[in-house]
């Protein structure tokens, strides 16, 4: 009887303490009247992942037309779709800025949430730095002065600042800009595919490659992997999306179709209409293919489209990085000032400034090992993301999920295991230099976490107290209901047990 009373008292006390904790948590909401609509979200996801068929050419050079076509047909099912499904379920279950940082935080605690944020942010800003460089590389074909020296330095600096200001002007503006950039950059490939139809010889599609040209499977896998990646980046914008529980599944599905068709149709047109010269299939060859199929005018349009695509990639990546920092501030992982918004445009101006500064600082370094290290960190982040997804299914089985992958936990393990094999491959083939740089970056992320804890304890910066209370308060509500249920069942079970004892005594 005393045990029952003490259990009941403990449950009641836990319930009271839990409610007091909830009341003490700050209310954090996204005050943004200009929410991101469906079509801009689709094109932002499209630019996070692809931006067009630019960059798919090395798959043909590495393994021949047949394997390239099969790769872009099959790889989305074993890599892109699992990543997109994970993003759709978790972005709708946790519709707040920060995306994957929130997921790791909720699954494994603040340390892993912070480390996830460090991995993904560093990976993102390094990729961000590459886009102005690629843009200047295209411009130097027209303006040779940008090839080297101070003019090149100045061009990279100015292009980075100008593109960053566009992001500062508002996410809705960025979204609709992405729509325009996407349409204009895809149009030349639509025309190329139509003009190529009479010239296509289907037998060229089943070619295994030219005789005497070996297969480069590492290049082949890497080309597929990085052309069909980053589906989760747009999750950091969930707090800025109109009705994210409805929008994200639709947007991810639409962007998936657009991405896959954007790769496979130009690939079929170019490989089918032009006799194979496998060594020519390197980055940028589709512009030459356009010239062979339709003339120089199409080559120039494809090259202009490449520059526009790079601009779209930059804007989408910068948005993801900036709103990730805002989400980390909401979670209390970073100082509250990291979530500062512009009074004029309501954009995370400090997040944009920090991301741009990181990108500029990396722009003038040797990219070979740094880019590989960014990919290494991204792979670590994805492994943690899959683990978070699986553990959240176990940890919160009753959590409301507006979109839920219709598979049991065992099936989800298999679904995540297949892409995890590719992630493990990327980690395994890294060089010693990549291991070293990645280790230093990871150490930075760990030191950052403990440094922020010291800042909290010393009150050097203002932080959100406790975990953020986002729009998905049902997690806390679920915990409260669980405590209430335990308390009620305890109250009911005690009299039942006493009755059963009395019944036994009477029967005896």
Image: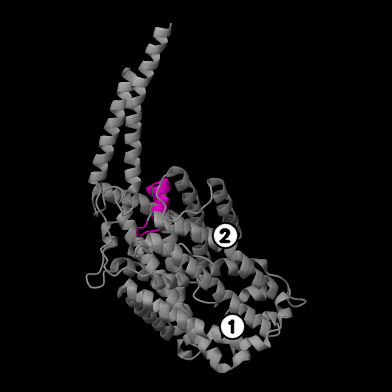
Label 1 close to label 2 by CB (< 8 Å) = no
Q: Nearer the viewer, residue 358 or 103?
A: 103
Asked if residue 297 shows in the view, the reply is: yes
- The tag on residue 182 is none
For label 2, the crowd category at 10 Å Cα-Cα, with few meaning under 14, some 14 to 19 and many 20 or more, is few
Q: Which residue is mark 1?
A: 286
Q: Nearer the viewer, residue 94 or 408?
A: 408
Q: Magenta segment, which residues?
A: 95-110
Q: Vertically, is 337 above or below 343? A: above
Q: Vertically, is 150 above or below 462? A: below
Decide whether residue 103 is among the magenta residues: yes
Q: Residue at x 70, y 82 (%)?
A: 276
Q: Secondary structure at mark 1?
A: helix
Q: Position of residue 11 (x, y in %)?
A: 31, 30
Q: Quadrant of residue 324?
A: bottom left
Q: Position of residue 343 (x, y in %)?
A: 22, 70
Q: Quadrant of residue 70?
A: bottom right
Q: Nearer the viewer, mark 1 or mark 2?
A: 1
Left or right, residue 354 beside residue 86: left
Q: Position of residue 278 (x, y in %)?
A: 69, 79
Work out which quarter of the rendered image holds the N terminus and state it.
top left
- The tag on residue 432 is 2
Left or right, residue 200 beside residue 370: right
Q: Residue at x 32, y 66 (%)?
A: 351
Work out which quarter of the rendered image holds the C terminus and state it.
top left
Decide whether residue 104 is among the magenta residues: yes
Left or right, residue 262 beside residue 353: right
For label 1, the crowd category at 10 Å Cα-Cα, with few meaning under 14, some 14 to 19 and many 20 or more, is many
């Amino acid at each position: 009887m005393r045990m029952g009373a003490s259990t009941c008292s403990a449950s009641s006390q836990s319930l009271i303490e839990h409610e007091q904790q909830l009341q003490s948590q700050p209310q954090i909401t996204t005050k943004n009247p200009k929410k991101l609509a469906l079509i801009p979200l689709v094109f932002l996801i499209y630019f996070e992942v692809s931006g067009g068929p630019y960059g798919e050419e090395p798959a043909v050079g590495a393994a021949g037309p047949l394997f390239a076509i099969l790769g872009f047909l099959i790889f989305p099912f074993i890599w892109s779709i699992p990543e997109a499904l994970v993003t759709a379920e978790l972005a709708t279950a946790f519709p707040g800025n920060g995306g994957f940082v929130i997921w790791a935080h909720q699954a494994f605690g603040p340390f892993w949430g912070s480390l996830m944020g460090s991995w993904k942010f560093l990976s993102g800003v390094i990729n961000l730095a590459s886009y102005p460089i690629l843009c200047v590389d295209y411009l130097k074909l027209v303006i040779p002065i940008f090839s080297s020296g101070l003019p090149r330095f100045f061009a990279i600096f100015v292009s980075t600042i100008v593109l960053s200001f566009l992001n500062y002007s508002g996410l809705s503006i960025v979204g609709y800009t992405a729509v325009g950039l996407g349409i204009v950059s895809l149009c030349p490939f639509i025309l190329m595919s139509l003009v190529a139809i009479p010239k296509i010889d289907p037998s060229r599609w089943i070619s295994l490659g030219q005789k005497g040209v070996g297969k480069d499977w590492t290049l082949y896998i890497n080309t597929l992997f990085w052309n069909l990646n980053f589906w989760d980046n747009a999750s950091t914008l969930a707090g800025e999306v109109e009705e994210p529980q409805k929008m994200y599944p639709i947007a991810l599905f639409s962007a998936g179709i657009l991405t896959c068709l954007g790769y496979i149709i130009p690939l079929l047109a170019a490989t089918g209409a032009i006799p194979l010269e496998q060594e020519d299939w390197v980055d940028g060859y589709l512009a030459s293919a356009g010239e062979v199929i339709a003339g120089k005018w199409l080559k120039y349009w494809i090259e202009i489209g490449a520059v526009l695509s790079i601009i779209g990639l930059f804007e989408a990546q910068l948005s993801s990085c900036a709103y990730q920092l805002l989400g980390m501030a909401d979670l209390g992982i970073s100082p509250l000032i990291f979530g500062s918004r512009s009074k004029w445009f309501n954009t995370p101006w400090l997040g944009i400034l920090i991301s741009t500064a990181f990108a500029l600082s990396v722009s003038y370094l040797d990219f070979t090992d740094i880019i590989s290290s960014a990919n290494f960190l991204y792979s670590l982040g994805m492994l943690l993301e899959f683990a978070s997804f699986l553990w959240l299914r176990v940890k919160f089985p009753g959590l409301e999920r507006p979109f839920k992958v219709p598979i049991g936990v065992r099936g989800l393990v298999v679904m995540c295991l297949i892409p995890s094999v590719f992630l493990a491959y990327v980690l395994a083939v890294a060089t010693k230099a990549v291991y070293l740089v990645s280790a230093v970056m990871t150490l930075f992320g760990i030191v950052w976490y403990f440094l922020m804890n010291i800042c909290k304890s010393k009150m050097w910066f203002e932080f959100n107290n406790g975990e953020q209370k986002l729009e998905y308060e049902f997690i806390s509500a679920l915990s409260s209901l669980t405590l209430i249920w335990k308390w009620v069942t305890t109250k009911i079970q005690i009299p039942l047990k006493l009755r059963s004892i009395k019944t036994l005594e009477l029967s005896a």
